[in-house]
Image: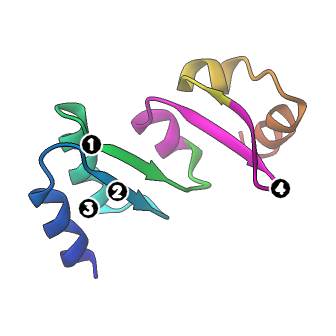
Amino acid sequence: MPRIRASLARRCREHCHLLGDTPNPPASLALGMARGGMTVIVVVTHEMGFAREAADRVMLMDEGVIVEENEPDAFFDAPRHERTKAFLSKIL
Protein backbone atom coordinates (compact mmCIF):
# COMPACT_ATOMS: atom_id res chain seq x y z
CA MET A 1 0.00 0.00 0.00
CA PRO A 2 2.77 2.56 0.73
CA ARG A 3 4.16 2.07 -2.80
CA ILE A 4 0.75 2.77 -4.28
CA ARG A 5 0.40 5.99 -2.26
CA ALA A 6 3.91 7.09 -3.25
CA SER A 7 3.12 6.41 -6.90
CA LEU A 8 -0.09 8.44 -6.69
CA ALA A 9 1.75 11.31 -5.02
CA ARG A 10 4.36 11.38 -7.81
CA ARG A 11 1.67 11.45 -10.51
CA CYS A 12 -0.32 14.21 -8.88
CA ARG A 13 1.04 17.48 -10.25
CA GLU A 14 -1.63 20.06 -9.51
CA HIS A 15 -5.09 20.38 -7.98
CA CYS A 16 -4.60 17.14 -6.11
CA HIS A 17 -6.04 16.27 -2.70
CA LEU A 18 -4.46 13.59 -0.54
CA LEU A 19 -5.82 12.27 2.75
CA GLY A 20 -3.61 10.36 5.16
CA ASP A 21 -4.08 9.05 8.65
CA THR A 22 -0.45 8.99 9.82
CA PRO A 23 2.80 10.67 8.83
CA ASN A 24 4.90 8.31 6.71
CA PRO A 25 7.52 8.50 3.93
CA PRO A 26 4.90 8.94 1.15
CA ALA A 27 3.38 11.78 3.19
CA SER A 28 6.80 13.42 3.31
CA LEU A 29 7.08 13.09 -0.47
CA ALA A 30 3.62 14.60 -0.93
CA LEU A 31 4.49 17.47 1.44
CA GLY A 32 7.44 18.32 -0.77
CA MET A 33 5.14 18.42 -3.78
CA ALA A 34 2.60 20.55 -1.96
CA ARG A 35 5.17 23.23 -1.17
CA GLY A 36 5.60 23.94 -4.85
CA GLY A 37 2.10 23.55 -6.22
CA MET A 38 -1.62 23.29 -5.69
CA THR A 39 -1.69 20.04 -3.73
CA VAL A 40 -3.86 19.94 -0.62
CA ILE A 41 -2.92 17.35 1.97
CA VAL A 42 -5.00 16.52 5.01
CA VAL A 43 -3.27 14.40 7.65
CA VAL A 44 -5.26 13.22 10.63
CA THR A 45 -2.73 12.67 13.40
CA HIS A 46 -1.96 12.82 17.08
CA GLU A 47 1.72 13.44 16.23
CA MET A 48 1.84 17.09 17.19
CA GLY A 49 5.54 17.47 16.37
CA PHE A 50 4.81 16.45 12.79
CA ALA A 51 1.79 18.75 12.65
CA ARG A 52 3.77 21.73 13.94
CA GLU A 53 6.64 21.17 11.54
CA ALA A 54 4.78 20.19 8.37
CA ALA A 55 1.43 21.99 8.46
CA ASP A 56 0.41 25.39 7.15
CA ARG A 57 -2.74 25.15 9.31
CA VAL A 58 -3.48 23.03 12.38
CA MET A 59 -7.00 22.17 13.54
CA LEU A 60 -8.37 20.52 16.66
CA MET A 61 -11.66 18.67 16.48
CA ASP A 62 -13.81 17.83 19.47
CA GLU A 63 -16.72 15.41 18.91
CA GLY A 64 -16.51 15.97 15.15
CA VAL A 65 -16.52 19.78 15.34
CA ILE A 66 -13.50 21.96 14.58
CA VAL A 67 -13.00 23.99 17.75
CA GLU A 68 -9.74 25.69 16.79
CA GLU A 69 -7.84 26.37 13.57
CA ASN A 70 -4.71 28.44 13.26
CA GLU A 71 -1.17 28.63 11.93
CA PRO A 72 1.12 26.22 13.82
CA ASP A 73 2.95 28.79 15.95
CA ALA A 74 -0.27 30.46 17.09
CA PHE A 75 -2.02 27.12 17.59
CA PHE A 76 0.71 25.71 19.85
CA ASP A 77 1.99 28.89 21.54
CA ALA A 78 -1.27 30.78 22.11
CA PRO A 79 -4.29 28.46 21.86
CA ARG A 80 -7.65 30.21 22.24
CA HIS A 81 -10.12 27.42 22.91
CA GLU A 82 -10.27 25.70 26.32
CA ARG A 83 -10.35 22.24 24.71
CA THR A 84 -7.15 23.04 22.78
CA LYS A 85 -5.45 24.31 25.94
CA ALA A 86 -6.42 21.16 27.85
CA PHE A 87 -5.26 18.87 25.03
CA LEU A 88 -1.91 20.61 24.61
CA SER A 89 -1.26 20.69 28.36
CA LYS A 90 -1.48 16.89 28.41
CA ILE A 91 0.77 16.18 25.43
CA LEU A 92 3.41 18.91 25.50
**Numbered disc in front, either 1 or 3:** 1
Which of the pair 51/9 is nearer the observer? 9
**What label does residue 3 carry, if any?**
none
Q: Amino acid at mark 4?
A: Glu
Q: Amino acid at mark 1?
A: Thr
Q: CA distance from mark 2 to mark 1?
A: 8 Å
**Residue 43: x, y in percent?**
47, 53
Q: Which residue is mark 2?
A: 18
On screen, 6 above or below 76? below
On screen, 5 above or below 25? below
Q: Is residue 62 magenta?
A: yes
Q: For the image shown, how many numbered marks are present on the structure?
A: 4
Q: Which residue is mark 4?
A: 63
Task: Report if the CB atoms under discs 2 and 1 are less than 8 Å apart.
Answer: yes
Q: How many neighbours does mark 1 have within 10 angstroms: few (below 14), some (14-19), or many (20 or more)?
A: many
Tell me the magenta residue range: 49-68
Task: Report if the CB atoms under discs 1 and 4 are less than 8 Å apart.
Answer: no
Q: Is residue 7 left or right of residue 47?
A: left
Which of the pair 24/38 is nearer the observer? 38
Which of the pair 36/92 is nearer the observer? 36
Q: Which residue is mark 3?
A: 26
Residue sitting at the far front: 15
Residue at disc 2, secondary structure: strand
